Amino acid sequence: MKTNWDVIVVGGGPAGLFAAWEIAKAGKSVLLCDRKREMGVPVRCAEACGEEDINKYLPVEERWVGAKTHSFILVLPNGKEIKLSNEKYSGFILNRDLFEYDMAAKAGELGAKIMMKANVIDLIHNDDGSAKGVKVDENGTINEYYASVVIAADGVESRIARKMGIDTTLKAKDIEPCVQVTASNVNLKENALYIYIGTNYAPGGYAWAFPKANNCANIGLGINGKYASTEKHSKEYLDEFLATYYPHVSVQKYITGGVPVSLTLKTLCKENMLIAGDAGRMVNPLNGGGICHAIDSGVLAGKAAIEACEDTLKIEKIFKKYEKEIYKTIGKRHESQYRIKNLVYQMNDEDYNNIGDEILKISEDKRSFFRIFSQVVKHKPELLIDVVKAFTGI
């Protein structure tokens, strides 16, 4: 196998796969290394995604769709339900394992080299500090590969970015330990995204039930890191939630993971390295959703890498343009969402119920997340502009 490439991508999630796909489309040589045994497995994700998030890059294939959804149902601490039904809330629950497997195949067909069980353990540095390659543990054998550009798409608290001297650590309040089951015999009333808000469900976070095919669903919760303790873990909260609200389900699998709910990383490039996806904290801090941002950042990182390979003397300018584009399209909105999140986390169940009662007075066709969060900041008018920014992109 050859050792020299135009670009090396570390990590085979949506960000890494779309970066590799974009680079291969341009005819550049790209190596993607992922430490997992099998592409797309395990799925550490609730799998909700807007249809347009993928469609703007390539047609959505039928086997990627676990279920189509057209509404949200917010369940308050007192059990009342608020339904939000609008075209803009239409989307689907991915079969993410199949989606990632197929994207790897599409990248491979274009010439990308995908390596599984390939754990990138270190960078190989030039004298000027830039990364000229990576050291990869392949079943106990350490091999070296070289490239003009390295893309770190290796997830939360990226090890590869840290190897480049970029601080990717997170405070406890900026990460949510999450746990989820995929269960059968769920019997959701509607093919909607069910969101349970309140400290009785998940302190500092929320619980969810997202439908999939054959009466199955992803049911999980995330709690704010400051509530995590050695006495009670997120799995115990989920077990209690299942026993109370879904006692008849049969659990097919458990998954756990940490979700960053912080600001987007300020430093997204250094020397000849780019950071994309969760590695750059490109996750909505208000709801923990990250698939769409991972895809967008992967495509943008791929385009920047292509441009850098064609003009290495302008690499700093090219990568700074990538950093600015990420801030403009993702990071700026995250700043507003982060401030709203911090206010929401100070609320108690009575606050949630009172806000819910106000929203229930609004006819269903006029309800929106914008109106909900406008109620949340009613007593903090200085945050109203953040609500506007968070839900309009201004």
Image (tube, rainbow, N blue to C red):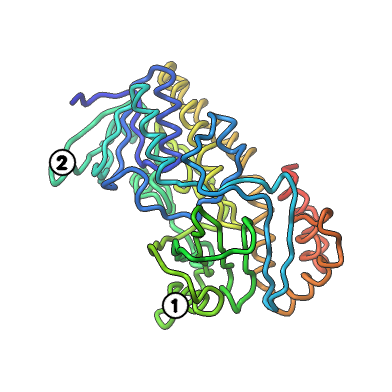
Relative placement, left or right, of 278 versus 27 is right
Q: Which mark is residue 21?
A: none
Place of residue 152 in the rendered image (x, y in percent of width and height, measured from the top left): 39, 40
Using a 10 Å C-alpha cutoff, classify the residue at mark 1 as few (fewer than 14 neighbours), some (14 to 19) or many (20 or more): few
Q: Quadrant of the N terminus?
A: top left
Q: Residue 306's image quarter?
A: top left
Earlier in the chain: of badge 1 and badge 2, it is: 2
Name above or below for residue 343 compared with residue 348: above
Residue shown at the point (51%, 64%) measured from the top left? 219
**Looking at the image, which is closer to me, 129 or 169?**
169
Place of residue 359 in the rendered image (x, y in percent of width and height, measured from the top left): 81, 65
Instruction: Give the SS element for disc 2.
Output: strand
Q: Quadrant of the C terminus?
A: top right
Q: Which residue is mark 2?
A: 142
Relative placement, left or right, of 35 versus 273 is left
Using a 10 Å C-alpha cutoff, classify the residue at mark 2 as few (fewer than 14 neighbours), some (14 to 19) or many (20 or more): few
Residue type, label 2 = Ile
Q: Which residue is mark 1?
A: 236
Place of residue 110 in the rendered image (x, y in percent of width and height, measured from the top left): 37, 22
Residue shown at the point (46%, 63%) measured from the top left? 184
Q: Residue furthest bottom?
A: 231
Relative placement, left or right, of 95 versus 122 is right
Residue type, label 1 = Glu
Place of residue 377 in the rendered image (x, y in percent of width and height, measured from the top left): 78, 64
**Looking at the image, which is closer to me, 27 or 365?**
365
**Looking at the image, which is closer to me, 244 or 130?**
244
Instruction: Give the SS element for disc 1.
Output: helix
Relative placement, left or right, of 320 versus 368 is left
